Amino acid sequence: MDQYIISSRLKQVRNALGKTSLDGLVLTTRANVTYVTAFGGDDSWAVVTQKGVYLLTDSRYTEQARSECVNCRIIERKGPMQKAVAKLVARFKSVETVGVEKATSFGVYQSLKKHVEAKVKPAGQIVEQFRCIKDQKEIAAIQTACKLAEKALARTRRFAKAGITENQLAGRLDFQIRSLGVTNSFDTIVAFGANASRPHHKPTDKKLRKNDTVLVDFGVRYKGYCCDLTRCFTVGKTTGLYKRAYEVVKQAQAAAIERIKPGVDVRRVDAAAREVIKRAKLPVFGHGTGHGLGLEVHELPIVSDKAKGKLQPGMVFTIEPGVYIPGKLGIRLEDDVLVTKTGRKVL
């Protein structure tokens, strides 16, 4: 990770701390820890103050941390994480109020309040607001992830023949992803026929029939950054209803993508997709139209009818409308889109 990039991120975080009267910030989620330290391991926290950033980890990860961390001091803890944070904060007389990120569990937050002598307060989504806007290297990583995901699926489709199970086809795709030198960004979803009406269906031993439909929702993680794609296709002949619903979903996705440009309210993007499906008199999907992508597969911004905010250049998110008819079919088309200075780019 470039030292300049990490320094710029820390500067943003410290400016935000100053505006909220916080002297330090405790980060407990892997993505936020990675964002400010470049460390990609697990079970590690970061503490950011106006003068330094500290990674608290254990002996399993110290060697990795030394090779990955940028502008960061590594502290190998021996006991509970909360006590390690308390010991660290106690060293700084200037740290009187410490923020704890919003994603931290209530139990951990209460434990920190018990052990840390400084005042402990909830800090909201300080780091997440900066992660929302991607730099060129982050965008390039997501785009590469998309290309590798498409390549993996192309290699897998030849196995989509009558008799293969959902589990087996998902396994074939996961193998191709690994063969390309990358990993899954989440558990692969493969759904045959009516099973696709469940948006988060888990693959089963259901077999693909001679004339059937397939939904594949999958993603790749490349250099820490995620993509998230959904593709639907048929094997053999299919029904007129499926063909019609597929075309409507395709039009709904295109309408939403067309709305994307800087300054647009995210709810307008969501509404564009829903309106197409509503006009076609098909069931309107119950989930959001999209979600942000980056170090996590679900992050800001959220694209839904309840979301707030306007699009900004550098945002990357999914557009994934769908039509679901229980007992009959499920269709979702999902692509990853970048907001550019003048409009959008499908990655």
Image (cartoon, rainbow, N blue to C red):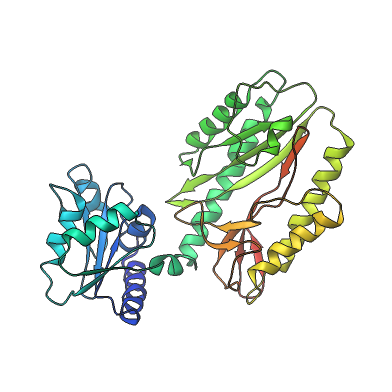
Residue 302, picture quadrant: bottom right
Q: Is residue 318 left or right of residue 10?
A: right
Task: Point out residue 223 in the picture as x, y percentages from the top left corner.
Answer: 42, 51
Q: Is residue 315 above or below residue 171?
A: below
Task: Point out residue 288 in the picture as x, y percentages from the top left corner.
Answer: 64, 56
Task: Point out residue 86 in the picture as x, y percentages from the top left corner.
Answer: 16, 61
Of 52 and 28, the residue lying toward us: 28
Residue 163, picture quadrant: top right
Q: Residue at x 74, y 56 (%)?
A: 253
Q: Residue at x 47, y 61 (%)?
A: 138
Task: Point out residue 243 in the picture as x, y percentages from the top left corner.
Answer: 85, 40
How many marks the image carries: the answer is 0
Question: Is residue 347 among what the camera can see?
Answer: no
Question: Is residue 31 among what the camera can see?
Answer: yes
Q: Residue at x 60, y 66 (%)?
A: 307
Q: Residue at x 58, y 25 (%)?
A: 167
